[in-house]
Image (cartoon, rainbow, N blue to C red):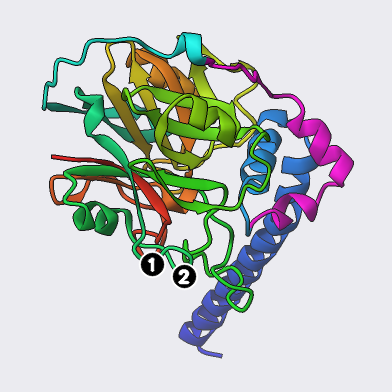
Amino acid sequence: MKPNNRLRRKKKHKIKHFILYLIFGLIFTGVTAPLIIFHGPFTNVEKTIVDASMTTLSHQWIAKLFLSDAQIQKIRSQDTVQSVNQGNNNLIKFINAHDNSIERYNISNGIKFTGYVLIVKDPTRVKVGYSNKLGTQGELTSQIAQDNGAIAAINAGGFSDSSSTSTKWTGTGGKPTGIIMSNGNIKFNNIKDYDKKVDITAITNKAQLLVGPHSLNDLKKLSVTNAVSFGPALVINGKGTIKSGDGGWGIAPRTAIGQRADGAIILLAIDGRTAKSLGASLKDVQNIMLQYGAYNASNLDGGSSTTMYNNGGLINNPCDALGERAVPSAFIVNP
């Protein structure tokens, strides 16, 4: 046999062994990685993945495939978010200077996440906008803003996984959960018990931000004019509500709203689920709100819904492969 042929055969043999080794390595990693994550010593990694998967509609199987319901519950019980009644006596009292400026800040936490903050000096400019096709399908946050002539917006309330029984997992934003109130008018409500307290993010007729568990009767007594159902409250009366752990929702894109003692509204969007920005925990969001002076603040719908719009375009980078996601409601800033 010629030397060149032997060399070629030897080279092919090495390539074949390398490919087989690579395939074995991928299979071995695929089999052992979940076992190491869910049953190994890295409890923080395990907790983050469990929390993140269990707070989404379509990825809960990731945790349930490797852990029992009891194990999942034990892991998630490590977090404590304190339920505090904001109350009528603790609503912020401020003098509105009617400053029409909006401040913008870029925020970063190394490789963990990047985000964006808008400070709206005049809180009377902030309202709830909603999809023109409410009950059928949602609209993009940017479209809701443009429909209302708003100069800024973030997505707001949550919605179920489908707009009808025949479109499961489509996530069209057409089927909201809880209540949507705009300019004093209820646009959607599936809460039957008017005394039942649920997480609400709302604004009163005096432009005061209301967060945390409240009933529909509470909203009436407190003269709420704009509201969506979502939470949990992250800051109440100047203090964070997360007393242990990271909030129990893992890391993901986040949207939140807060209010300073001077009345200014804080709008926050944090990107996630990308190599440049993995996402933030609820504790991260709480800390950012406190850093920017929030006296009251609430978490809003996050994940693929997280969107921030300003001056005719998107500020953040929504993580959905198709770009912006259709949602039922948004907090908008009027000119």
- Decide whether residue 81 is among the magenta residues: yes
Image quadrant holding the C terminus, namely top left
- Left or right placement of residue 71 versus residue 301 in this view: right
Amino acid type, callout 2: Thr
Marks 1 and 2: in contact by CB < 8 Å? yes
Q: Which residues are magenta?
A: 59-87
Q: Position of residue 118 (x, y in %)?
A: 24, 30
Q: Which residue is disc 1 drawn over? A: 133
- Left or right placement of residue 249 versus residue 303 in this view: right
Q: Secondary structure at mark 1?
A: loop
Amino acid type, callout 1: Lys
- Left or right placement of residue 294 versus residue 65 in this view: left
Q: Secondary structure at mark 2?
A: loop
Q: Position of residue 60 (x, y in %)?
A: 69, 53
Q: Give the spatial CA distance, label 2 vs label 1.
A: 6 Å
Nearer the observer, 249 or 223: 223
Q: Which residue is disc 2 drawn over? A: 136
Image quadrant holding the N terminus, namely bottom right
- Rendered view: 63 above or below 46: below
